[in-house]
Amino acid sequence: MRVETIGLATLYLGDCRDILPKLPKVGAVVTDPPYGIGKDGQKRTTGGNGGRKAYDFKGWDAERPARDIFDAIRALSDDIIIWGGNYFADVLPATGKWLVWDKGQRINQSDGELAWTSYHGALRIKVLNRVELMTDGAEHPTQKPVKLMKWCIDQVRGHGAILDPFMGSGTTGVAAIQMGREFIGIEREPEYFDIACKRIEDAQRQGDFFTGAAA
C-alpha cells in the first residue's frame, strides 16, 4: 500500500476492502463506484459532439462492489452520496433524497445519472452539460465533472473529511480541495492513482496561490 499526503488530502493506493476498516469516522462519503457494466474502457469515437477519447479496458468495471463494501462505507459516516445508486438499490436502504445529473445532451449515451443519498428529503437535479469534462480534462472513462462533485459536497451535512473509496482520477478530491475540505481517497489502479495525485496537487497548489495572494 502506498500513501501520499498532499496538503489537505490523504491518498491511498490499494483496495478499499483492505483500507476502509482501518479508517476513522469521516464527515461524509461522496463516491462513484464501479457499476458492473463494463465501462472501464472505451474505443475512440468521433462525431458532431466532439466524440470520445480512447481508454484501455482494465477490467475494474466487470462487477459491482460486494454488499460488505457498502456496509463498511455506511459504518464510516451517516452522510453518504453514492453515484450509480440505481445499480445498488438492493444493497442500500430506501431513502427519499436522490440526486440526478441531467447531462444536458440527448445522444446515444444515458441522458443522466442517479445518486443515492443517506438523506430523506426532496429529490434534487443538477443540469450540467457533459462537455464540462473537456474543460476539466477527461482522464478517466467514467469521470464526473468537478462542478458536479462540488454540487454533491454542497448537499452533505457532515463536517470533516470527505472520503471517496473509489477515487478514480480524483475528481471528488479536486472538488473537496477547491472547497477547503479535507479529503481521503482510495484507488487501486496505479495509473489512475498517479493521475489523481497530480490533479489534486494542482488543485492544492492553486488554492495555496490564491491564499497567498489574499494575504
Image: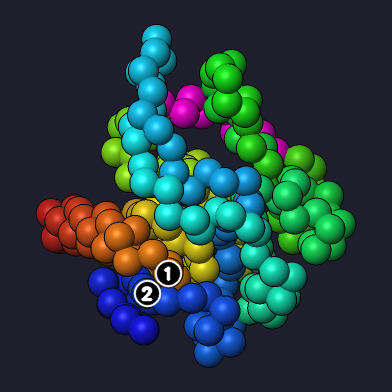
Kindly state the secondary structure of the residue where label 1 is placed: loop
Left or right of 198? Residue 126 is right
Specify the quadrant that holds the C terminus: bottom left
Q: Is residue 175 above or below residue 16?
A: above
Residue 179 horizontal/vertical position (percent): 39, 56
Q: Is residue 51 above or below residue 195?
A: above
On residue 188, the disc is 1
- Label total for image: 2
Residue under the image location 62 percent in, 28 percent down: 110
Residue under the image location 28 percent in, 57 percent down: 195
Residue 50 horizontal/vertical position (percent): 35, 18
Kindly state the secondary structure of the residue where label 2 is placed: strand
Seen as rendered, the residue at the extreme right is 94
Left or right of 104? Residue 118 is right
* Residue that label 2 marks: 13
On residue 30, the disc is none
Residue in front for this viewpoint, 159 or 86:
86
Q: Are marks 1 and 2 in contact (CB under 8 Å)?
A: yes
First in residue order: circle 1 vs circle 2: 2
The amino acid pointed to by label 1 is: Arg
- Whether residue 207 is visible: no
Tell me if mark 1 has few (under 14), some (14-19) or many (20+) residues whose alpha carbon lies within 10 angstroms of its own.
some
Q: Quadrant of residue 134?
A: top left
Seen as rendered, the residue at the extreme top is 48
Magenta segment range? 124-131
- Whether residue 49 is visible: yes
Tell me if mark 2 has few (under 14), some (14-19) or many (20+) residues whose alpha carbon lies within 10 angstroms of its own.
many
Q: Is residue 104 above or below residue 146?
A: above
Q: Is residue 126 magenta?
A: yes
The amino acid pointed to by label 2 is: Leu
